[in-house]
Amino acid sequence: MDFLDTYSIKARLFPALIAVLPAFVLFLLAGSWKDPGLPEAMTALGIGVLFYAMADLARRAGRHVQRKLFKESGGFPANTELSHLDTTLDSGTRDRFRNFLARQIGKTAPTRESEVADPAGAAQFYVECYNYMRNNTYDTERFRVLFNENISYGFRRNLYGLKPYGIAINLLAVLAAYGLYRYQPPFATLSQGKIFIQGGFALFHALYFIFAVTRGTVLDASKTYARQLTMCCDVLIRETTA
């Protein structure tokens, strides 16, 4: 039943549903709904299995895309919001978060001068700080906003990973629709009007994948998640000092 948890449904199953929509539309258009029989039942079962398989594929494709994106940018992106040299947050908030995390991990927080003189040492300090925050923000109720941002990132990453599959399914669905119209097999029929519906849907679906599912949307979601992870330090501070 792990497949039915909130993250799996929203970040894995939903991208899979979007990717296979052309096949589902073809099923609805070509099926005999006045007198459904075994072909419709078997096709419905097959689509259900396809959704599960595509959800698993979305997870694997998303991870592949993530590794590729991070490799192109020089490795896994580092959180830099706590650095003296980063101006995303105001200096007072950075100092408050940095000093709190230094106490939690038992290290001395770097100064601006030490960051410049020893960037590798400062980077290691911030890695430990963010590891601490990640390890202490698993509670999805206490850190609901962070959890939602993680879902948003997972959804965009996995959908981007499915982009070539989504476009290919569009093409295959149009070809299958034409074949059903041309040869009129006994198990499914399509009229000329339904062919245009399938083709129009496939066109808009393909345009969505081409122009809306992009590398930039994945990176933007990654940055938003990283920013929210930093802001979770406020919750940790309140709970520690309460």
Image (cartoon, grey):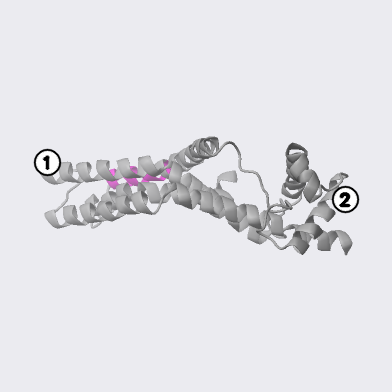
Can residue 44 be spotted in the picture?
yes
Q: Is residue 14 magenta?
A: no
Name the residue type under label 2. Arg
Name the residue type under label 1. Tyr
Magenta-colored span: 38-49
- Residue 94 shown left or right of residue 72 in the figure: right
Q: Dot 1 corresponds to which residue?
A: 183
* Front-most of residues 5 and 36: 5
Q: Nearer the N terminus, badge 1 or badge 2?
A: 2
Q: Which mark is residue 51?
A: none
Q: Is residue 46 magenta?
A: yes
- Residue 131 shown left or right of residue 32 in the figure: right
Q: Quadrant of the N terminus?
A: top right
Q: Main secondary structure of the magenta part?
A: helix
Q: Which mark is residue 103?
A: 2
**In percent of the image, x 64 and y 52: which residue is there?**
226
- Residue 166 shown left or right of residue 1 in the figure: left
Q: Quadrant of the C terminus?
A: bottom right
Q: Secondary structure at mark 1?
A: helix
**In percent of the image, x 42 and y 45: which residue is there?**
51
Contact, mark 1 vs mark 2 (Cβ under 8 Å): no
Q: What is the x, y in percent for residue 18?
A: 39, 51
